[in-house]
Image: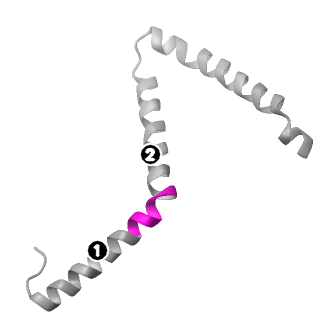
Amino acid sequence: MIQKLVNPATYTTAWSNFMSSSAAYYKPMFRSSSATPLWHFMLLTSVVMYTASYQYKGIAVQQKRQDQKKALEEYYAKHGGGGH
């Protein structure tokens, strides 16, 4: 099992199978000017962007937002004023 996982031919074969099946699926749609490939590409892009935003950098971004919110609350408590 481990030997199969480290063998590059496993991934090469899987990739070529994926590409050939994708071509067989999408080629007629492209020729008929279907919107389905566009929607699939948009969905894939959304999933990739969501994953990149919230899995890889989301923790740091959320921490920074919490720090800024806390700093603003302290500022408003000291100087008056507030949010909208």
C-alpha distance separating marks 2 and 1: 24 Å
Residue 22 on image: x %, y %: 61, 22
Asked if residue 74 can be seen in this view, the reply is yes
| Residue 74 relative to residue 84: left or right | right
Q: Is 52 drawn above or below residue 20 in the view shown?
A: below
Q: Quadrant of the C terminus?
A: bottom left
Q: Which of 47 and 65 is in front in this view?
A: 65
Secondary structure beneath disc 1? helix
At x 47% / y 31%, what residue is drawn? 40
Using a 10 Å C-alpha cutoff, classify the residue at mark 2 as few (fewer than 14 neighbours), some (14 to 19) or many (20 or more): few
Q: In which quarter of the image is the N terminus?
A: top right
Q: How crowded is mark 1: few (under 14 residues within 10 Å), some or many (20 or more)?
A: few
Q: Total of numbered circles in the picture?
A: 2
- Classify residue 16 by image quadrant: top right
Label 2 vs 1, first from the N-terminus = 2
Rendering quarter of residue 5: top right
As for residue 58 lying within the magenta part, the answer is yes
Residue type (three-letter) at the residue carrying disc 1? Gln
Asked if residue 69 lies left or right of residue 25, the reply is left
Amino acid type of the residue tagged 2 in the rendering: Met
Choose between 1 and 26: the one closer to the eye: 1
- The part of the chain drawn in magenta is 56-62
Q: Residue 21 carries which label?
A: none
Residue at the location (34% across, 75% down)?
A: 66
* Residue 68, numbered label: 1
Residue 8, given in percent of the width and then of the height, sits at: 81, 32
Identified at 67% across, 26% down, the residue is 18
Residue 13 sits above or below residue 29 on the image: below
User: What is the magenta segment's predominant secondary structure?
Assistant: helix
Helix, strand or loop at label 2? It is: helix
Residue located beneath label 2 in the image: 49
